[in-house]
Amino acid sequence: MLSLTFLTGCATKTRYVERQSEELSQAVYGTKDSIEVARIDLAERYIKQASRLVAPPKNRAKIEAIVKSKNDKETERVLILPNSNKNDKVVFVDSPEYLELTKDSRIAQQLKMELQNWQLYTKEVDRKLTEQYEIQNEMIVKIQDLEKQVLEKDKKLLRKDIAILWRNIMIVSLIGVMGVGVYLRIKGVL
């Protein structure tokens, strides 16, 4: 009976921030899959969400743009794609070619579905970030409560230590007075 009481007293509702969440996995694999099918527009969206979910590293990998000189004063940034994309046509979002693609009903439907999925995913990321923030705040409050409890216990221990010290001083004083009384009695003064 006593052990059951102790076991039920150990149950807590502690929640921890996950190192890897479903939302982060979706972002990483969404980026990977988007790059594999030459959808850099989607890869950009997914990687931005992944960077919201993960704290920046202490030592970031240094990545710089490739900038090519056109003439004396002009430069242009170069987009470099993997060799697997050498036979693919490059189309920029909101360009005339892109708008032409959206006139195809199958492609328009695909883009519409991707946008809906993207909006749902973004809401999930926002929910996850809110949950992580709440858990972190909850942990901070619990730590502060524990610190207060430790300080209170330290104060109680200090009071007990002072009370024990005074008791010991009184005992030693009484023993000393009794010893002096016995000594004086033996000497015949009392």
Image (cartoon, helix red, strand yellow):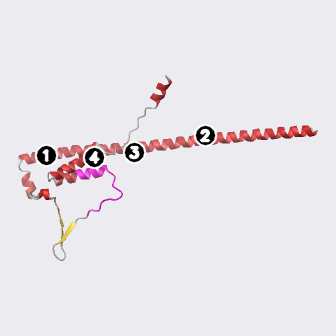
**Residue 94 visible at all:** no
Disc 4 from disc 2: Cα separation = 47 Å
Of the numbered discs in the image, which one, if any, rests on residue 156? 2
Residue situated furthest top in the rendering = 1
| Mark 4 or mark 1: whose residue is earlier in sequence | 4
**Badge 1 element:** helix
Residue 187 image offset from top left, x and y in percent:
92, 40
Please, what is the three-letter code of the amino acid marked with disc 1?
Answer: Lys
Foreground disc of the pair 3, 4: 4
Residue 14 image offset from top left, x and y in percent:
41, 37
Please, what is the three-letter code of the amino acid marked with disc 3?
Answer: Gln
Q: Which residue is mark 1?
A: 112
Residue in the foreground of this view, choosing between 187 and 170: 187
Residue in the foreground of this view, choosing between 127 and 86: 86
| Mark 2 or mark 3: whose residue is earlier in sequence | 3
Residue situated furthest bottom in the rendering = 72
Whether residue 14 is in magenta: the answer is no
**Residue shown at the point (14%, 44%) measured from the top left:** 113
